[in-house]
Image (cartoon, rainbow, N blue to C red):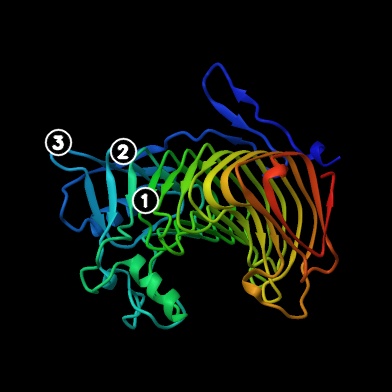
Amino acid sequence: MFTSLVQFFVGFFSCCVCILSFAQDTRQVIEPKQPMICRTLFANGDDDRTSDIQSALMHCTFGQAVELKQTAQNTVFLTGPLNIPTGISIKIDENVILRAINKSAIFDRGGRRCGVLNGDGNGCLPLITFEHALNGGIYGKGEIDGQGGETLQDQPWSWWQLAKQAQHLHAKYNAPRLIQINHSQNMTFYQLCIKNAPHFGLVFSQSNGLTVWDLHLDNPSDARNTDGIDINSSENVTITHSHISTGDDHIAIKANIHTGPSHHISIIDNNFAAGHGLSIGSETQAGVYAIDVDRLYIHDAENGLRIKSNAVTAGEVSHILYQHVTLQHVKHALVQDTMYENKIGDTKDHWHDIYYQDIAILGASKLIFNGNNAKQPLHIHLQNVSGLDHVEWLLQQSIVEDK
């Protein structure tokens, strides 16, 4: 019944254009094409190029891109925060590095909060911001380097060290996200490499239409709060042919009560290494539904397929299909936890129509199904799940079907 909602990968046409068509992302997603170049900038290494790049972006017309190109001597562009106009993109050529300046004052929103422990954790500007944008993005086989592990020029710590201080002291901290997309439509990120993010890598918030194709995102496994991709209160998302290895969630799908649901999302043909899992939550108050996860390989990770929430952030999660997934050397292969971080209260999660089909669990692992904060017992639908003979089960208020 539920499988009728899924349309499979169409394949490669003779013209080598790849088309994806799925039931969840309502768009027909095709392999992106590079936009027309309006201006080309050349790397010069040590100089701050923020104003040069921003000026070039402002002089392009809708549908065009600024190209960042290497020279015989240099491959690096140093930059502070950039605001991308609607309809404009950046193309980072192969071997070119767009590198964040490792100075907290450059990213400060005001009040000298960036790079320190205080406030609400929102004291830093992102490296790249798309606001109310249409048909923009970042293309090319080049690299964005957030310098998360480098000691800041104006603080005695790195971004990642600051995050660990905050964890130890149970405090908030201020570090820049790499790419922030707000209230935008039809955004594309193609053949891009991201590494050393100070905080979250790519955040898609209150927006409609995101294509992430052939993204390579790499952060160390101990780099705290370095989510790969966050989808917040958004719809029509396809993430495909991508590799993510990081220190927190590979992907986190969230739905804040004040900003709306997240729905119609396809996560197809991907490879994840270190990280905390393909996660839904913990904020699910406004509802998360219509998610397809197909042909995914996760290895050497803390978590695999995870849904997490609690009494503070609880909401409905429904019509989720996980299929053709291999989980190898994953500590917690399958997780549904309604008491994430052990928070309790009166609000109850309502999770239903969540299916696991054709799942292979390789190596020792644990399955966690904790429904103690659910409106009714969790119904765990397993079909053709292999490797269950060498896993440990944790079941609370949960019923396993088709085991």
Q: Look at the image and tell me whether residue 175 can be seen.
A: yes
Q: Amino acid at mark 3?
A: Ala
Mark 2 vs 3, N-terminal side: 3
Residue 302 in percent (x, y) is at 54, 54
Quadrant of res 234: bottom right
**Residue 241 located left or right of residue 85:** right
Closest to the observer: 205 or 149?
149
Q: Report the disc number at residue 248.
A: none
Closest to the observer: 372 or 16?
372
Q: Report the disc number at residue 72.
A: 3
Q: Report the disc number at residue 195.
A: 1
Mark 3 packing: few (<14 Cα in 10 Å), some, or many (20+)? few
Taking the spot 29% from the left edge, 62% from the top edge, the residue there is 80
Single out the mark in the foreground, 1 or 2. Answer: 1
- Say if mark 2 contacts mark 3, CB within 8 Å: no
Residue at the disc numbered 2: 93
Mark 1 vs 3, N-terminal side: 3
Q: Amino acid at mark 2?
A: Asp
**Residue 292 located left or right of residue 3:** left
Q: CA distance from mark 1 to mark 3?
A: 24 Å
Quadrant the N terminus occupies: top right
Residue 313 in percent (x, y) is at 67, 72
Determine whether the residue tagged by mark 3 lies in a helix, strand or loop. Answer: loop
- Say if mark 1 contacts mark 2, CB within 8 Å: no
Mark 2 packing: few (<14 Cα in 10 Å), some, or many (20+)? many
Q: CA distance from mark 2 to mark 3?
A: 14 Å
Quadrant of res 347: bottom right
**Residue 97 located left or right of residue 328:** left
Mark 1 packing: few (<14 Cα in 10 Å), some, or many (20+)? many
Question: Residue lying furthest top in this view?
Answer: 14
Residue 105 in percent (x, y) is at 27, 73
Taking the spot 34% from the left edge, 78% from the top edge, the residue there is 116
